[in-house]
Amino acid sequence: MSVFRAAIAPLLAGAVTLGSLSAWTMTGRAGRPADVRVSDAWVMVPMAPQTSAFFTLTNSGDASDVLVAVRSSASVVTMIGRQADHDGSGSMVMIDTLTVPAHGTIRMTPFTTDVMIQQTHPLTAGERVPFTLVFRRSGTVRVTAVVVPPGGHS
């Protein structure tokens, strides 16, 4: 009987806690998970075998998310990169991941972040290029980017 009495308090506390957390979640106050949308996808007309793709990543969730991979059938290799300042001159630095903050937007541009691609075939203006972006929480997002000439995207 004493073993039963010793076990009842922790079990009761666990049940109350679980019930309270469930009620809190059902009211919507527990927050929304990361929810990343991808828009404004474009690729710069290549002047070499490599070029860059750009996306706008918008997270409407209450938690940050992380871009962990980008794939495209039009690219042998894809790499996420960002501009860095080294002794007053800019250079591109490859990064493994890119964090999209909760309720935040990242607009990739030639002066911030981008996705470097090594083409499988010469890309031409107007061509549509499929991409798959993989996020840690939001999962896989498929998007089509349009190839534009320099100055062709605002």
Image (cartoon, rainbow, N blue to C red):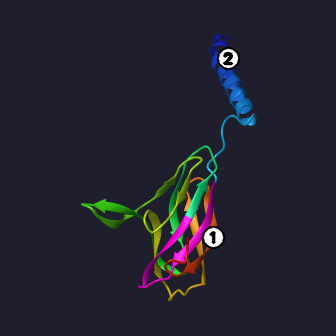
Q: Residue at x 64, y 10 (%)?
A: 2
In the picture provided, is 63 more to the left or to the right than 120?
Answer: right
Q: On screen, 82 above or below 25?
A: below
Q: Mark 1 points at which residue?
A: 143
Please tell me how crowded label 1 is: few (under 14), some (14-19), or many (20+) other residues with Cα within 10 Å.
Answer: some
Q: Does the magenta stretch include residue 41?
A: yes
* Amino acid beneath label 1: Val
Q: Mark 2 points at which residue?
A: 8
Magenta-colored segment: predominant secondary structure: strand
In the rendering, at what x and y percent does residue 34 appear? 61, 49
Residues at circles 1 and 2 in contact by the CB criterion of under 8 Å: no
Among the two numbered marks 1 and 2 on one chain, the one whose residue lies closer to the N terminus: 2
Q: Nearer the viewer, residue 54 or 70?
A: 54
Q: Does the magenta stretch include residue 87?
A: no
Q: In which quarter of the image is residue 139?
A: bottom right
Q: How far apart are marks 1 and 2 (CA)?
A: 54 Å
Q: Which of 72 and 60 is in front in this view?
A: 60
Q: In which quarter of the image is residue 7?
A: top right
Q: Residue at x 54, y 87 (%)?
A: 124
Q: SS class of the residue under badge 2?
A: helix
In the rendering, at what x and y percent does residue 66 appear? 52, 54
- Number of numbered labels in the structure image: 2
Q: SS class of the residue under badge 1?
A: strand
In the picture provided, is 26 more to the left or to the right than 60?
Answer: right
Q: Residue at x 56, y 85 (%)?
A: 125
Magenta part of the chain: 36-55
In the rendering, at what x and y percent does residue 5 appear? 66, 12
